[in-house]
Amino acid sequence: MEIPSDEKEIAATQRREFDDLQNEIAGRETGRRARFLRDGPGSETAKKKERDAQHRELTRLAQLLNDPIYRAKYDSVLQLLSDAEQATEAAIDHLETQIDAAQSEINGMMNNAARLPDGTRVFRDADGVVRREDGSAVEDHLAETILWTGNEPSFEDVLDAKGRLDDLQAALDAANGYQNNVLGPARDRITDPDNPPSLDDLDDIENDIQSKMPKVVQEHLPQAETAAPDVATQGIGLPKLDG
């Protein structure tokens, strides 16, 4: 039995409308005007709203950068930030190398240390007192059991080496803290496309980068004399290893 032509047209229209609905839900272009989800994810209205929002964001930053005063300040702070980031990376790399060397030096001292019968390492100080690593004096009857070779490091040598290692580690902690707590947030703030920093914000970012910069990072800046001194960490430098 042949299906009437009007029923065929109805069925075809229903299939086409179903296909259009699925395409609109998926956000696919069909070449036809959206009819079902006019404000849905794939609708022209939604797409226009998204384009307008993107345009407003770009325009907001573009308008600020069109101001020569703002542009000069923005570029200056961005350059300072980039220099500080590079100097911090260089400082961290150098400190890690220094720490490895300092630790190796201490390990060598420990290997050359004299020992008590129970294996405890001991060292003679400048006054001839035999001491353990913690500084406690060794009892006379135990000190008499030690066989000295003459190659042992002194107690003062060990203290100095450990002090240098502590200073290096403190400098590394300062550099890492500066990188994570100052430079990271500064980078996020100055490159935020949704909320560009104002001139006052740029001044604050610049001040933070300069005033909170550890001395060990200042030493790796292209022009160290341009960096503001850091009162909190100015005593932390790069301790020099003997030899």
Image (tube, rainbow, N blue to C red):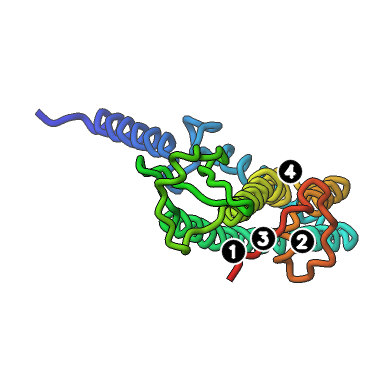
Residue behind mark 3:
239
Amino acid marked by disc 1: His
Q: Mark 4 points at which residue?
A: 195
Mark nearest the camera among 1 and 2 is 1
Residue pointed to by mark 2: 80
Where is 121 relative to 8, above or below? Answer: below
> Where residue 103 sits in the image (x, y, percent)?
50, 56
Q: Which of 73 and 205 is in front in this view?
A: 205
Residue holding disc 1: 94
Label 2, label 4: how far apart the Cα atoms are: 20 Å
Asked if labels 1 and 3 touch by Cβ distance under 8 angstroms, the answer is: no
Q: Residues within 10 Å of mark 4 (few under 14, many from 20)?
A: few
- Mark before the other along the chain sequence, 2 or 4: 2
For discs 2 and 4, the disc positioned in front in the rendered view? 2
Q: Position of residue 117 (x, y in %)?
A: 35, 43
Mark 3 vs mark 4: give the one in front. Answer: 3
Mark 3 vs mark 4, CA separation in Å: 42 Å
Which three-letter amino acid code belongs to the residue tagged 3?
Pro
Kind of element beneath mark 4: loop
